[in-house]
Amino acid sequence: EAGVTQFPSHSVIEKGQTVTLRCDPISGHDNLYWYRRVMGKEIKFLLHFVKESKQDESGMPNNRFLAERTGGTYSTLKVQPAELEDSGVYFCASSLGHNTEAFFGQGTRLTVV
Amino acid sequence: GESVGLHLPTLSVQEGDNSIINCAYSNSASDYFIWYKQESGKGPQFIIDIRSNMDKRQGQRVTVLLNKTVKHLSLQIAATQPGDSAVYFCAEINTGRRALTFGSGTRLQVQP
């Protein structure tokens, strides 16, 4: 069974450009989460989907970030326009239930120059 | 606000020794705790979890201890191996929020 996959693994973009990250959760997992780790700090929650609905988006830093999960399968996280402080590693995770083991993807390393 | 933090940023141990990684949390409503291991270039990998109605749980070479009185969580790794070298994160979930809150991570270095 495939795990959580993220694409791309690395992205280098210029300040002001747009980047879209993709996450494919484990099949059948209704819960999908986005997290990020910036500047080597702790991993911070961004938002949580249950199927196609945003359950909690309290961690989204500002309106330059837009997450979607059309159809309740894969999810995208778009950053537009990207700023230098957006650099970091973006992780996606999925789980069957909200209080069960969450499986993480390998992350997308975003570098904004 | 709630926070989950780690006491030691880096822990260096000799191969074969036991390792103990500590974590403090501040949210008394936390009811589910998880330890994750993250190797370079990979995402966090589940190691072991414990619910708030327990104070100890054992896995293969790993033990998690939970002290709710002082809001402290620890991960014990027996007979540490070079493959255990990684960054370890504690994380918690509370009943009011369905997403993980992570600590800042401890790097474990195993010396051969």
Image (spheres, coloured by chain):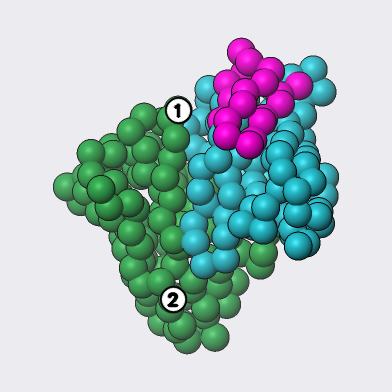
Where residue A77 sits in the image (x, y, percent)? 36, 61
Residue B10 is left or right of residue B96, and the answer is right
Residue segment shown in magenta? B49-67
- Specify the principal SS of the magenta part: strand
Q: Which residue is mark 2?
A: A10
Q: Secondary structure at mark 1?
A: loop
Q: CA distance from mark 1 to mark 2?
A: 30 Å
* Residue B49 visible in the displayed image: yes
Where residue B78 sits in the image (x, y, percent)? 71, 39
Up-down relation of residue B49 to residue B40 (above or below): above
Q: Which residue is mark 1?
A: A99
Q: Secondary structure at mark 2?
A: strand
Quick one: B54 or A79, which is closer to the camera?
Answer: B54
Amino acid at the residue labelled 1:
Asn
Up-down relation of residue A43 to residue B95 (above or below): below
Q: Is residue A15 magenta?
A: no
Residue A105 is left or right of residue B12, and the answer is left
Residue A73 is left or right of residue B20, and the answer is left
- Residue at 71 percent of width and 48 percent of height: B80
Tint of chain B: cyan
Q: Give the chain coloured green.
A: A
Query: Which of the 4 image quadrants contains residue B14?
Result: bottom right
Q: Is residue B50 magenta?
A: yes
Where residue B44 sits in the image (x, y, percent)? 52, 52
Amino acid at the residue labelled 2:
His
- Residue at 51 percent of width and 31 percent of height: B97
Q: Tell me which label, 1 or 2, sits earlier in the chain.
A: 2
